Image (tube, rainbow, N blue to C red):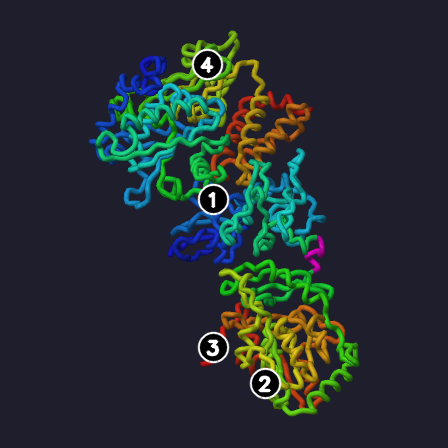
Amino acid sequence: MDVMEAKVLTKNFGVKDSHTLPVYESTGGYNVLKRLFSMKPEEVIEEVKKSGLRGRGGAGFPTGLKWSFVPKDSPKPKYLCVNADESEPGTFKDRYLMELDPHRLIEGIIVCSYAIDCHQSYIYIRGEFVFPKERLEQAIAEAYAKGYLGKNILGSGYDLELTVHRGAGAYICGEETALLNSLEGLRGMPRLKPPFPAVVGLFGCPTVVNNVETLSALPFILGEGPEAYRKFGTEKSPGTKMFSVSGHVVRPGNYEIPLGYSLKKLIEEDCGGMKDGKALKAVIPGGSSVPVLPAKDAMEVNLDYESLAEKGSMLGSGGVIVMDETTCMVKTLTNLAHFYAHESCGQCSPCREGTGWAHKILKRMLAGEGRAGDLETLHRIADNMAGKTICVLADALAMPIWSYLKHFRSEFEAYIEK
Amino acid sequence: MPKLTIDGKEIEVADGTTVFEAARQADISIPHFCYHPKLSIAGNCRMCLVDIEKMPKPAISCNTVANEGMVVNTKTEKVKELQKSVLEFILINHPIDCPVCDQAGECKLQEFYMDYTMTDSEFHEEKVKKPKKVDLGPNVMLDDERCILCSRCIRFCDEITHTSELCFSERGDRSTLTTFPGKQLDNKYSLNTVDICPVGALTSKPFRFQKRVWFLKHVPSVCSGCATGCNIYMDYDDGKVWRYRTRDNESVNQCWTCDAGRLSYPLHNEKRVTRPMVRKNGVLEYSTISDALGEIARALSSLGGDEAVLVGSAQESNENNMALKKFGQTCQIKDLQYSAKPKDDADADNFLIKADKNPNRAGVQHLGYQEFHGGIGVKVVLALEGFSETHLSQLREEGPVAFILLATHLGPETELADVVLPAATFGEQEGSFTNFQNRVQKFEAALIPQGMVLPAWKWLEKIAQELKQPLQLSAEALLQEGFGLKFADLGTEGKILESKN
């Protein structure tokens, strides 16, 4: 299928004033609400389950299933928190979804909130996203004025308030429970699980945390039906997904493609191929934390959950970082280690110490002071921190360490003194 | 009531019990830093990771609820590797200078290193530098480099004292324990953070670098600071008490002690009366034991029983007060009053600190003593130390012919006394206090009384002897006679007195 056909999220990208309410309405925006309010919340959840939509923030958890964990009989208020803290290096899709089509997100928020019986939703937006935040606030004001938000939406009797909250610059606040802590005014640190947010979330109440892209797909799913959504993508990975392509390609940028699309085609055709005619060396397919693919694997893989897993990597957030033959993999990994060491919240011993330790070793190697045993130690640090902490930030550095050492070991060995 | 197997041991636990607690119930210890039974679960140290069959990843036992049929391993090679790796991580930025660390000898990190790894570090980088001497508050000093960020102290201030002075700043391996801007760790229980700090990060200002802990010996004892009677260990060496440490007693103080009580230990070491004294020509002078006893005998034998008052003390033990009562029975002195420190309503809370600053008011009242009211025309007062300022000025005004005092400390009371006998503190004798709950709690002797110091009941024996009215006393017998209890009955948790009615 051609990229141009798959327009679930980016339909209005390129349309003049796509961020305004009149333009959104003129393209069928907010039409879904009438149908929505005629449905029972369970039916909405069922439709979303049928669509096969999975969380687009990185973890890929089935969205409808996540919603169904919210206890219906709880007397507490329920919350939807929109994760707009897009911070994974290489990922810049949510930013554009909010800048160019904020009403699609708002409509999606109304769908989800209605489905989980939530009357107060929050958008937790990355602090640095000043412009998207302004666009969002404008759009929210428009939606309130038109009666899409607030009391008794479109005469349905359903109320929903929507509030934007800005983060203060911590990557970890994109982790859903750290996000909740931060929203509550606490230090942004992931919470112990169980309990999960669906049961004990924001202010101790049942909460769904969904990514911007996930929610932005809902107007289409509810409007066109789950079958229409499933026409895109593969049987196991249905739908479309945003991929933010950066690095050594001719046309970096955001691409909405049906899942299952060939990475080779994305790079060579859609992105115009490698910059300056250089040869491809490696691709990080899903944001900086997922395992890197050497060129050979990258040229064979399709962009869906299963194909990427087969090649030992992950779809993640869809941040595709393309590296050509001039890239130093030791430098690249050092850069990543620096990032994760800087962003570790510091509560779990293995992550707090392991990320910093790995970064120091790599920095020393780059400075020409590599020692025998460094690579083994790096590997051991990754082994010892992955899967042993409250959240997966430690894994987010362990996966690059393993994969870089596996595929590009000789480059690292060159930095070790003989 | 799920049944689970831990290290091959099958046990049944109450619903909701964590694997960690289940293991503890089965006498299987799992190493840990951040877990504390009285605090919320933080799950950050990762030291208590265990292997649970059928679980994909190692799980922290402190936050995993025990389920029916669970098979938990805490001692397999796999778990040992986990423990080693967590300790390796914690140690990379921790100073490896145990010999100069004040916590050495009672440091969990040091102990676990010895127990679980004993391997050299592979860390060849520069350690993170952090502040070494942070003055957190009046009683607590912080060495941030030693902090392993377990957050116990933060949770203590959030959840127990509700004062929330402490927090972390910075992130990752730069994370630093600190106080909120403009705040000090200044609450009445701040030294508990030192107790629960598993490493040498938080130290007690009065105790730090005063004594290597392995020289300390300890006895179970009871704090004399107020009517709560917090259970403590008295740490002593070289004829001196060096500190009090909290001793767990769920029914009294759980595992906490207030700062004021905890820091009252110098009473055993300072301003002590060590020799008998007799007032001659208005001046209190050292005397021999026989001169002092002779003086007392003269005062007491020259008058009738109703011309003397015996003053017990809410500051003194059940046994010494009982001894005084028995002395009264022998010498036909019936007027039994007791002195006490004044109540301090400003220094009281609904946790551990009582307005009644006496450890044994319930005990003296049980023995039938009346609170001190003086006695018009009384000629002789024989008293245990413990007068309040008010009582003392009353005594000064009434001006008895002879004020005989069994005193532990030099002070306003000894200044007024005509004869002073050097009495032992509760750290120098076996005995008991009765707290506000009517709970009789035992303390043991840590120190041997120095110089001519004796427990008050032994002095009373000697005075009776001098009066030719021999008394045969012992702490055990006094407790038995006054309270119907034996020391062995008191156990580690004390014993509530049966109501007298």
Q: Out of B94 and B47, give the one closest to the viewer.
A: B94
* Residue A86: percent from left, percent from top: 44, 27
The magenta segment: B209-215
**Which residue is label 2 attached to?**
B335
Side of B447 where B372 appears, left or right: left
* Element at label 1: strand
Q: Say whether residue B286 is visible.
A: yes
Q: Tell me the crowding category of disc 3: few under 14, some 14 to 19, or many 20 or more residues within 10 angstroms, Cα based.
A: few
**Marks 3 and 2, the one that precedes in the sequence:** 2
What is the CA distance from the residue labelled 3 to the residue labelled 2? 25 Å
**Marks 3 and 1, the one that precedes in the sequence:** 1
**Which residue is label 1 attached to?**
B59
* Element at label 3: loop
* Residue A140: percent from left, percent from top: 34, 27
Asked if marks 4 and 1 fall on the same chain, the answer is no
Between circles 4 and 2, the one closer to the viewer is 2
* Element at label 4: loop
Which circle marks residue B498 in the picture?
3
User: Splitting the image into 4 quarters, where does residue A380 fall?
Assistant: top right
The N terminus of chain B lies in quadrant:
bottom left
Q: Image point 33% across, 19% down: which residue? A: A20
